[in-house]
Image (tube, grey):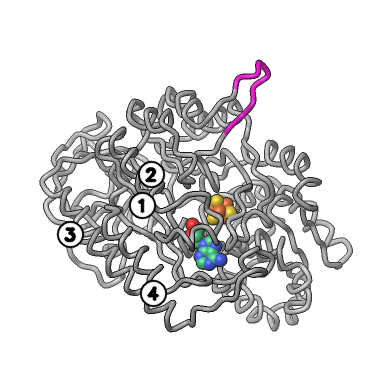
Amino acid sequence: MTKKLYIETVGCQMNVLDSELVVGSLRRHGFELAHEIDTADVILFNTCSVRQHAEDKIYSALGTLRGHKRRYPEKIIGVLGCMAQKDQELIRRRAPHVDIICGTGQLARLPELIAEVERTGKLQLALSLDRTESRHEVERSFESYDPLRDPSMRPNRFQAYVRIMIGCDKFCTYCIVPSVRGPEQSRHPEYIAAEVRQLADEGCKEITLLGQTVNSYKYEQGDGRRLRLSDLLDRIHGTSGIKRIKFITNFPRDMDDDLLDAVRDLPKVCPYLHVPAQSGCDDILRRMKRQYTADYYRDMLARCRERVPGVAISSDFIVGFCGETEESFERTCHLVREGGFKNSFIFKYSPRPGTKGHEHYPDDVPEEVKKRRNNDLLAIQNKVSLADHRRKVGERVEVLVEGPSKTALKADWSGPLQLTGRTMSDHIVVFEGNERLTGHLVQADIEEATAFTLFGRVVTREYDGVESASGASGEESVAQLGQRQRIQLPLVSGAP
Ligand code: 5AD
Ligand code: SF4
């Protein structure tokens, strides 16, 4: 009999990809996806530790499952990912009804862990050892694991993530990632190219290469040559079927000219760079151990724009980091005012036990002040985003159509069908159109803009060389799409 699996995902794109791979691997062991917790035999939470809020959400979800587990003791509950790696003891204490605690580097072992709980009824712990010891083990596991793609777990078949690195060696003082995701390791370029090929064969048009500091990618080849992200982009650019290549997230210090030249010269590579600044104040950047000054970051922005004309840039900022004064915050506001970012993700500092920031500096900015700074910075960024989006009005852009817009998916929506998609520069475009355009590239004229969205009109009846009137068979109906989004899209919160 097939067993049913329910999985909920919190956190970044890396977690979304991990969940896809977990489902891919469990399907091979006879599992099917359940759409509700009630009908599932195995309930998994893929967790995030980057901020306290993400952890609180999981503890609260686990709390509500306590009664469920008492009524159905045979059901298996698992906590996966970053929080499992970091909080093993705490999870055991706060949620003793959990059966599996499995860290980020150990997900390939899940089928075996589930079988072991079924056999013994005992808690199964699978955690990576410390950063040096676990290195080779993790390296081996992700080569057998990453190709286990499961298209049905993705919101759609034409977009996919591909991991090119794991871990991080930067150790920014606020950040838990280096301790929960382990040391930085770049994947073999041939494995990456093969995975991209496989995705293209399955109908994927857009791939997003993932790494915590994706532009630090480097792979030493046997001949002593060191391959970098620019070389990798060049290597996979020829994959037929793939129309767009993106990569996230970048570290400002590793934004080399050869990478920028590759973005400019390779037509499938999207002119979109997510390069988190985190702060505009040198004192704070030093405390954060970001390895650059605000002026270095400004020069880097200028270099990106000079080498890649028309590039769209987005950023992340943390407000209320330890020691952030009104003056330091004002410097960050200044950087956002002049930075010209398409958008920024703004976070209130959340102290993470186990990080240098938590050990060395008091969390001395009161919560109300963090909130106010968050709102103020958002208001500034919104003005900048509006100006950025308005500049697109009047342009003709190519849009990869992702499906009905959120508004069109609402039960009470009765207007003409609105579709949404993204431009090469990652701008969101909403327009009226036939649902059969989903998954295709269309040309649209941009007529209006808000801070978050461009509104346009499709100008061609041709898409990807296919006449829209004749339609592409086998496309999903809106109802199916809506259902798939409700049921199978993992719960994602937070920013990249
Ligand atoms: N508190 C708040 N925000 C954080 N980020 C990382 N660690 C923390 C933290 N402790 C933010 C950074 C990063 C994004 C993914 O999350 O801005 O770029
Ligand atoms: Fe965390 Fe990114 Fe810094 Fe690595 S580079 S420690 S993932 S913020």
Q: Is mark 2 within 8 Å of ligand 1?
A: no
Which residue is found at the position 39% from the left and 56% from the top?
480
Position in image of residue 80 (x %, y %):
68, 60
- Tell me which label, 1 or 3, sits earlier in the chain: 1
In this rendering, the answer to whether 379 lies above or below 70 is: above
Q: Amino acid at mark 1?
A: Ser
> Which numbered disc, 2 or 4, marks the residue that appears first in the sequence?
2
Q: Looking at the magenta stretch, what is its main secondary structure?
A: loop
Q: Can you say whether 394 is above or below 174 in the image? A: above
Task: Give the percent coordinates (x, y) of residue 3.
Answer: 69, 58
> Which residue is the site of mark 4?
326
Give the image location of residue 115, x and y in percent. Answer: 81, 56
Circles 1 and 2 in contact, beta carbons < 8 Å: yes
The residue that label 3 is drawn on is: 416
Reading the image, the residue beneath label 2 is: 273
Labels 3 and 4 touching (C-beta < 8 A): no
What residue type is disc 4 on?
Glu
Q: Residues within 10 Å of mark 4 (few under 14, many from 20)?
A: few
Q: In the image, is 398 to the left or to the right of 250?
A: left
Q: Nearer the viewer, mark 4 or mark 1?
A: 4
